[in-house]
Image: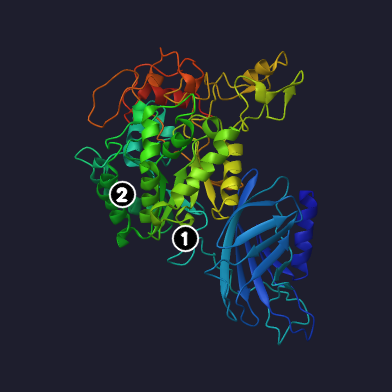
Amino acid sequence: MSRTRSTSRTALLAALGLITATGATATVLGTATAGAAAPGCKVDYQITNQWNTGFGANVTVTNTGDPVASWTVEWSYAGNQQVTQGWNATITQSGAAVTAKNVSYNGTLATGGSTSFGFNGSYTGTNAVPATFTLNGVVCNGATPTTPPTTPPTTPPTTPPTTPPTTPPAGTKADNPYAGAKVYVNPEWAAKAAAEPGGTKVSSQPTGVWLDRIAAINGSATSMGLRAHLDKALEQKGSGELVVQLVVYNLPGRDCAALASNGELGPTEIGRYKTEYIDPIAAILADSKYAGLRIVTTVEIDSLPNLVTNVSGRPTATANCDVMKANGNYITGVGYALKKLGSIGNVYNYIDAGHHGWLGWDDNFGPSAELFKQAAVAEGSTVDNVHGFIVNTANYSALKEDHFTINDSVNGTSVRQSKWVDWNRYTDELSYAQAMRAKLVSIGFNSNLGMLIDTSRNGWGGTARPTGPGALTSVDTYVNGGRYDRRIHLGNWCNQAGAGLGERPQAAPAAGIDAYVWMKPPGESDGASKEIPNNEGKGFDRMCDPTYTGNARNGNSMSGSLPDAPISGQWFSAQFQELLKNAHPAL
């Protein structure tokens, strides 16, 4: 529909008194048939923000009729608007028709009572405000059913619509914690980034706070502890909502297949993990002082996928992963963390789910989902303690490959047979995250499960970024010439040369995705390129050595890592500069 036609339609309705409109706000009043006994209602629909292909909206529904115990609000769009993420209501869409149903805490509406919900959506062309809404199947009107108006009102309401709340009532959790909220900017990372040439372009971006050892909980004279971060978050919060992102990362026998991120606890020290690590974190997070913060915990990255891919029977097996599978302490530890942290009303747990270049193959994908379910119900936990999953944490997989799909073929050869794809089902993180979400819901996780994608280092921009598909000479030239991800092999993970900052952190960017996040702070090393003694338990992994010729996990390829890197978590200026240079979208 053209913009002119849409505008004219809205103007006509306003002239008739059926809506009052200012900018992108409309209050639908309507009329009722004289003598009708239908319930009454009023709907205020407000477009709160709008950008090139997306928008946010808040809807307030007021019941002017008899009390209701549950409600369903429906409307239809005149254009191609699509709801992508909602909160304070369960929202579905079929074609142009949208249905919003109450959630558990806001179903009751007394006479004169109101409730609000919100959502993000996408559109192209025009974004006209819907003209008609219904409440429980009845067209909304601005009066009670006993005295319906016989003529349309000719003046706007004397009281402007109130701004609907973006959070559920106290004691309940938002469907998407990132919706309508700012995200905590770690001042320690921000200072390091700002000190770099060009770093002020990104130093105000939110990043994750890594609790990767027991000492990180209390901090030191030179580093902030958990309470210090939460106190600073309260300062940043102001009167709105704010998300704090924590990485819970200290399992016994941590990262059994990658020495660079080994931890301080031995394989059997599950008791210390519970009492010296998880319990103190939970005690701090449960402090009522921090109840107004939305605390996102990303739980034990890289742990559970190792129990699927790096154990006996696989060419990628390691003895350490066999030990952790046998003793069960990854499952035990994750289950304990989920139960302990999930019991806190303002904590949102997201389990790490690897990335498409790790779990995207048929023999990894399903078994990994089943293992996630096993961990989610271990130690007395339940799936209700899992708000979602995070993918691509501290990794480099491209968000979206635009120049090839697994359905393509070259000279009769499927793209899945290319050396790069190697029979994987997925070519990028967005498609993998959405598919993994669907799989997890199908095996018993909650239907409102949300996904996070770490985009801190998967931009792959700069002058080498392809602008179209590769040559049709062979399936390999086609894929290699068009792929954004320029790693030598999908299995490479340490300080990758040529990488760039990815999409900036943002809420609800795509269906099923709660947010794009920078969980791995850009500029912090993945691991040392040579052995460096340290007191953090972090070993030397040859995958961080730029001279290494590889192993079964990366197809015996070169590591593709940058030289002269410090141990994991320490500042790596050369990497940060490369990420700035190759950012996409460009800075």
x and y percentages locating residue 104 in the rendered image:
54, 68
| Left or right: 470 as drawn, with respect to 177 | right
Q: Marks 2 and 1: CB-CB under 8 Å?
A: no
Q: Amino acid at mark 2?
A: Ile
Quarter location, residue 322:
top left
Q: Nearer the viewer, residue 456 or 433?
A: 433
Can residue 23 be seen from the camera position used here?
no
Q: Callout 2: few (<14), some (14-19), or many (20+) C-alpha neighbours within 10 Å? A: many
Task: Give the mark nearest the N terminus, 2 or 1.
Answer: 1
x and y percentages locating residue 543 in the rendered image:
41, 20
Q: Secondary structure at mark 2?
A: helix
Q: Which residue is mark 2?
A: 278
Residue plotted at (38% across, 29% down):
523
Q: Amino acid at mark 1?
A: Lys
Q: Which residue is mark 1?
A: 173
x and y percentages locating residue 264 in the rendered image:
27, 35
Q: Secondary structure at mark 1?
A: loop
